[in-house]
Image (cartoon, helix red, strand yellow):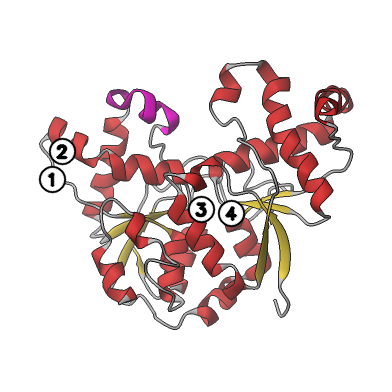
Amino acid sequence: MSESKKFTYYPGCSSQGSGAHLDRSLRAIAPKLGIELEELEDWNCCGASVGHIEGGQLANTALSGRNLANAQAQGAQDIVTGCAACYLNTHGAAEKIKADVKLRERLNEALGAADLKYDEDRRVRHACEVIVNEVGLEKVRQAVTNPLDGVKVAGYVGCQTVRPFAETEAGGAYDTFDDPEFLDDFIEACGAEAVEYDIKTACCGGSVSVMKPDKTLHLIKKILEKAVEAGADMIATPCPLCQTNVEMYQDAINKKYGTDFDMPVVFYSQLMAVAFGMDGKKDAGLDQNIIKAKKLEEKAK
């Protein structure tokens, strides 16, 4: 990719809090990969959890529809997001609107209250798919100036990033549902070792972990156990909710099960930022991790 490709960037709510280090590191690495991110103006929550509980399909679609309408007004480029939930909701809404004339009519009736309209078909893409299909691994390798040699990483994709769109044409057909390789490829392109990790798409409990962690601690425990068994120094993930859950509940798991987990959980974009020779705090956001990725911090120094 010799010239930068421009995208409308939808950060999502997690970028303002628990996933701030994904947002920071993704913005940092984008120019290195020939990606120009123009933030979506006046964006709103995609309704990842609440939208499915209150208001039904139209209310949930209208949340993403408002973002789509704002993106349409902003330019003709594709929309990209780094958050799995934002991608699922926004991409899913865009595809439903495209396929259902009556839904589009109802949506535009609702959007009309805010003087908005969505009458185009905008493509919504996940940042990982863009890196695979638009950038390519060779471009990632070329950007590496500080290889992460000696660092062993368990690539934990989670269940949402590849389901249900990764194998579809609309989703870029960039990997498989059951055994995706893109994250391991990213890790190895950065010079680190991607350890064998056969539960890379297991569920961490998602939003249930936030509301009722006792119901899902056993799921997170298995994710951590497998990473330790594989000899990983850290877990890397593309998903903000996976990152939060697997990192945040280690103390609770240790207390309940008598374990001693102290496993760093980072974003793939943090690995890339460090491997690209960028600042560990300002660019990679390593100061945002609760459990410090000491080997990565050492590489950043």
Marks 4 and 2 sit apart, C-alpha to C-alpha, by 34 Å
Residue shown at 75% from the left, 54% from the top:
78
The residue type indicated by label 3 comes to: Pro
Q: Secondary structure at mark 2?
A: helix
Q: Are marks 2 and 1 in contact (CB under 8 Å)?
A: yes
Q: For the residues carrying marks 4 and 2, which lies nearer the camera in this image?
A: 2
Q: Report crowding for label 1: few under 14, some 14 to 19, many 20 or more residues within 10 A (C-alpha).
A: few
Q: Secondary structure at mark 3?
A: loop
Q: Which residue bears the numbered disc 4?
A: 175
Please identify the quarter of the rendering in which residue 118 is found.
top right
Q: Are marks 4 and 3 in contact (CB under 8 Å)?
A: yes
Q: Is residue 205 above or below residue 123?
A: above
The stretch in magenta equals: 206-215
Q: Which residue bears the numbered disc 1?
A: 260
Q: Report crowding for label 2: few under 14, some 14 to 19, many 20 or more residues within 10 A (C-alpha).
A: some
Q: Tell me the chief SS of the magenta region.
A: helix
Q: Can residue 181 be seen from the camera position used here?
A: no
Residue shown at 29% from the left, 69% from the top:
297
Q: Looking at the image, is mark 4 or mark 2 earlier in the sequence?
A: 4
Q: Position of residue 127 (x, y in %)?
A: 60, 56
Q: Position of residue 201 (x, y in %)?
A: 44, 44
Residue shown at 32% from the left, 77% from the top:
149
